[in-house]
Image (cartoon, rainbow, N blue to C red):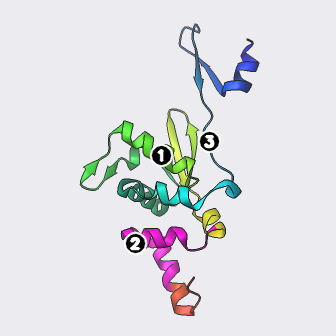
Amino acid sequence: MAACSIVQKFGTVDLDVKGRYIKFMRPLFHPALEDIRPEAILYALSDPERVAIFAKLATAGCGGTCSALADLGDRVIPKSSLSNHFKVLRESGLIRSERQGVEMRNQTRCAELDARFPGLIRSILVAYGQLPGQLETMSREKAATGNEP
């Protein structure tokens, strides 16, 4: 199988230092906006640790790496658990992940999701007491003008 067809079938191909082995990196699954289901969002945000991770990402604005989000105040999430949490968040459509070298950069899809499911993410974060400052300010402004969703 030629390297070109391997890349088309499996994603990116990297050679090790000596050039003998081919390592495959599967492409990341990101559902299209129309394929995102509310039950997938509710499942992904049913875990308090995932809600805390998502809230930290939402407050970061520009996104963050997986390792930077491992510290949740009084506890540190192990890397294996953190990888699974990001996978669930990504496959539910809540975040978009991108490989940058050896790190994964994650960003929320809040604007897209709010257009598709108005008020859903905000309501869940409020219920957990995890509403980020940026979203909290927007909700106060809407309440003041009487445009509360």
Callout 2: SS: helix
Q: Which residues are magenta?
A: 117-140
Q: Residues within 10 Å of mark 3 (few under 14, many from 20)?
A: few
Disc 3, disc 2: CB below 8 Å? no
Residue 93 is a magenta residue: no
Residue that numbered label 1 is attached to: 86
Amino acid beneath label 2: Ala
Q: Is residue 132 visible?
A: no
Q: Is residue 7 above or below residue 106?
A: above
**Residue 59 versus residue 44: which sits nearer the camera?**
44
Q: Is residue 7 left or right of residue 149?
A: right
Of labels 3 and 1, earlier in sequence is: 3
Residue that numbered label 2 is attached to: 127
Rounded to the nearest angstrom, the CA distance separating label 2 from label 1 is 21 Å
Callout 3: SS: loop
Q: Residues within 10 Å of mark 1 (few under 14, many from 20)?
A: many
Residue 58 at what x, y percent from top left?
Answer: 49, 61
Residue 24 at what x, y percent from top left?
Answer: 59, 22
Rounded to the nearest angstrom, the CA distance separating label 3 from label 2 is 28 Å
Callout 1: SS: helix
Quarter the C terminus occupies:
bottom right
Residue drawn at (59%, 9%), measured in percent from left and top? 19
Q: Is residue 18 above or below residue 104?
A: above
